[in-house]
Amino acid sequence: MWSFSHIKVLYKPFVAEFSTCCKLQAMKAAGRHLPKVYITRRIPPDGLNILKQSGSCQIEQWDSDDPVPRSELLKKVSGVQGLYCLLTEKIDKEVLDAAGPSLKVVSTMSVGYDHLSLEELKQRGIRVGFTPDVLTEAVAELTVALLLATSRRLIEAVDEAKNGGWGTWKPLWMCGSGLTGSTFGILGLGRIGEAIAKRLKPFGVKKFLYNDIAPRDELASRISAEFVSLEELAKQSDFITVCCALTPETQEICNKHLFSRMKKNAIFVNTSRGAVVNQEDLYHALVNGQIAGAGLDVTVPEPLPTDHPLFKLKNCVILPHIASATVETRNAMSALAANNLLAGLRGDAMPKEVPL
Ligand SMILES: NC(=O)c1ccc[n+]([C@@H]2O[C@H](COP(=O)([O-])OP(=O)(O)OC[C@H]3O[C@@H](n4cnc5c(N)ncnc54)[C@H](O)[C@@H]3O)[C@@H](O)[C@H]2O)c1
């Protein structure tokens, strides 16, 4: 005689399968109403997995390592609720008009947000996520590498060694300038500026100076940095690194006026954004010996054309915008941008939101 408990055991697998099937049907049905998200590039796996596993959005993506063409972007953003973008996409009135009123959140996989029209976003009540902190260490590390490559003339020296320029050991050949006992200037003392200073202290830098919109006493006290005017920063520093955000005020803030006030043996490094530098003025400063060398991770335009005059200078080291390029960092950036996007879609506080 079959008891109820026998029947329960016998039918358990079928009941479980039926219930899973119902759940999937329900999820599929719900999927039709899930918010639409457009991702403008192939992104590191951590970020994509977070979005996919959340099961809370319909994802469409420009599945390429190259930027989405503008016309495609304008087509694809129509009707989306979330936009996951990179620093290569200019998110302006045209894109926001093309997206329409459905757009709730823009999440950029970058700490800089000069490519976003913040005023337009604010007017439309669209929230913005970005990726500070997770890239600070990688960018600071690369800045130190670029600084040393420039000040100790590493690229030039490698070329000489490879191309037959390496004769006998010569006391005055390939000499650069050392960090020990130097005065180091930071233009824009934020997260990255502080992380650079922390790394350079053990190199024996004697004095850190900085210029910013206003003194940042608490942060500056952690690295014993002194607030000075831009003029003083230029005059006193043996090395200057630019770490400020690109804004209308910092656009071409590094120009002939600044370079003409710098020391002749000074090294200039920029890992912030290319547009903070007037490149023509920098070229002349390097050619005329107003400063000793420049290391750039960022330029205008990007990529910098291979026949650009700056590439011809031995005292200019140019990298292709790789400051945050470690596998761990790029994954962390993609994950943070994904979590910002999801929080924005839910209407929750974002892990990192740009205050508008
Ligand atoms: N090369 C790369 O791959 C890469 C990677 C990450 C960040 N970045 C750039 O680095 C910048 C800094 O990043 P962060 O995380 O340190 O940002 P942050 O906001 O902590 O620091 C930026 C600093 O710039 C200062 N600043 C703004 N306007 C200024 C002005 N007119 N004069 C002087 N200082 C001014 C701010 O007050 C702030 O202290 C980003 O905005 C981004 O553009 C580049």
Image (cartoon, rainbow, N blue to C red):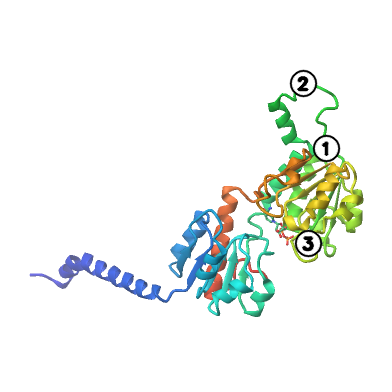
Within-10-Å neighbours for mark 3: few <14, some 14–19, many 20+: some
Q: Nearer the viewer, residue 61 or 202?
A: 61
Question: Residue 214: where, in percent of width, then height?
Answer: 84, 65
Which one is closest to the eye, mark 1 or mark 3? 3
Q: Secondary structure at mark 2?
A: loop
- Tag 1: residue type? Gly
Which one is closest to the eye, mark 1 or mark 2? 2
Within-10-Å neighbours for mark 2: few <14, some 14–19, many 20+: few
Q: Is residue 94 left or right of residue 266?
A: left
Pointers 3 and 2 in contact (CB under 8 A)? Answer: no
The residue sitting at 89% across, 49% down in the picture is 262
Q: Quadrant of the C terminus?
A: bottom right
Q: Nearer the viewer, residue 214 or 128?
A: 128
Q: Return the residue at label 1.
A: 178
**Vertical side of 208 occupied by 265: above or below:** above
The residues bearing labels 3 and 2 have C-alpha atoms spaced at a distance of 44 Å
- Tag 3: residue type? Gln
Q: Secondary structure at mark 3?
A: loop
Within-10-Å neighbours for mark 1: few <14, some 14–19, many 20+: some
The residue sitting at 55% across, 59% down in the picture is 335
- Can residue 145 be seen by looking at this rendering? yes
The residues bearing labels 1 and 3 have C-alpha atoms spaced at a distance of 30 Å
Q: Nearer the viewer, residue 277 or 34?
A: 277
Question: Residue 246: where, in percent of width, then height?
Answer: 74, 61
Q: Is mark 1 within 8 Å of ligand 1?
A: no
Q: Return the residue at label 3.
A: 251
Q: Return the residue at label 2.
A: 167
Pointers 1 and 2 in contact (CB under 8 A)? Answer: no
On the rendering, which quadrant does ligand 1 occupy?
A: bottom right
The residues bearing labels 1 and 2 have C-alpha atoms spaced at a distance of 23 Å
**Vertical side of 74 occupied by 138: above or below:** above
- Can residue 239 be seen by looking at this rendering? no
